[in-house]
Amino acid sequence: MSYRIPFIPSRRSGFTLIELLIVVAIVGILASIALPAYGKYLVRGNRAAAQAYLLNLAQAQAQYFADAHEYGGTPTALNLPVPAEVASYYTITIDAAGGPPPSFTITATPVLGTRQAGDGNLTIDNSGARTPTNLW
């Protein structure tokens, strides 16, 4: 009489190649969705910082006008240096016209080569008009 050992499948630990490929595909799909959304979030955040700074400059212009009867031509004249988070992505210019009547237009132009480059210019003037309206 011969004794036979029943078939016992060997247990291997680890993952198969198919399982790894499925995981890589799922991670790739999630990354392709998440990265563009995150990039848009960063652009909106940088734009919000620039908008806040433009509003501060406009308010400083009103105070400067009350004191000097003219508008300041640079952020340093208004004692408001450009913050680093704004200067990294935007160039700020002030066009102060002597008048009559005196007026100003403050423009934030995106720096080329940054993620803000396709965002467009932001402007605010002495009447409080902000353009483009879809970005404010």
Image (tube, rainbow, N blue to C red):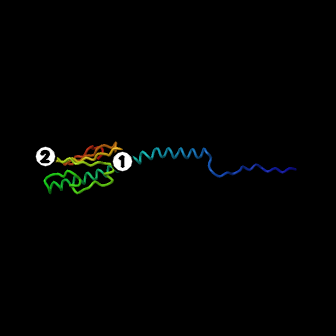
| Total numbered circles | 2
Label 2 crowd (10 A; few <14 / some 14-19 / many >=20): few
Tell which circle, 1 or 2, labels the residue nearer the N-terminal end: 1
Q: Residue at x 62, y 49 (%)?
A: 15
Type of the residue with mark 2: Gly
Q: Residue furthest right?
A: 1
Q: Is residue 92 left or right of residue 103?
A: right
Q: Residue at x 30, y 48 (%)?
A: 90
Q: Nearer the viewer, mark 1 or mark 2?
A: 2
Q: Residue furthest left?
A: 100
Q: Residue at x 29, y 45 (%)?
A: 109
> Contact, CB < 8 Å: mark 1 with mark 2?
no
Residue 95's x, y, as percent?
Answer: 20, 47
Residue 89's x, y, as percent?
Answer: 33, 49
Q: Residue at x 41, y 46 (%)?
A: 37
Disc 2 element? loop
Residue 64's x, y, as percent?
Answer: 17, 55
Name the residue nearer the viewer: 59 or 87: 87
* Up-down relation of residue 112 to residue 69 (above or below): above
Q: Which residue is denoted by mark 2 in the rendering?
A: 99
Type of the residue with mark 1: Val
Q: Which residue is denoted by mark 1 in the rendering?
A: 43
Residue 11's x, y, as percent?
Answer: 69, 51
Label 1 crowd (10 A; few <14 / some 14-19 / many >=20): some
Find residue 5 and name its label: none
Name the residue nearer the viewer: 29 or 82: 82
Task: Report the Cα–Cα distance between label 1 and label 2.
Answer: 36 Å
Q: Is residue 29 left or right of residue 113?
A: right
Disc 1 element? helix
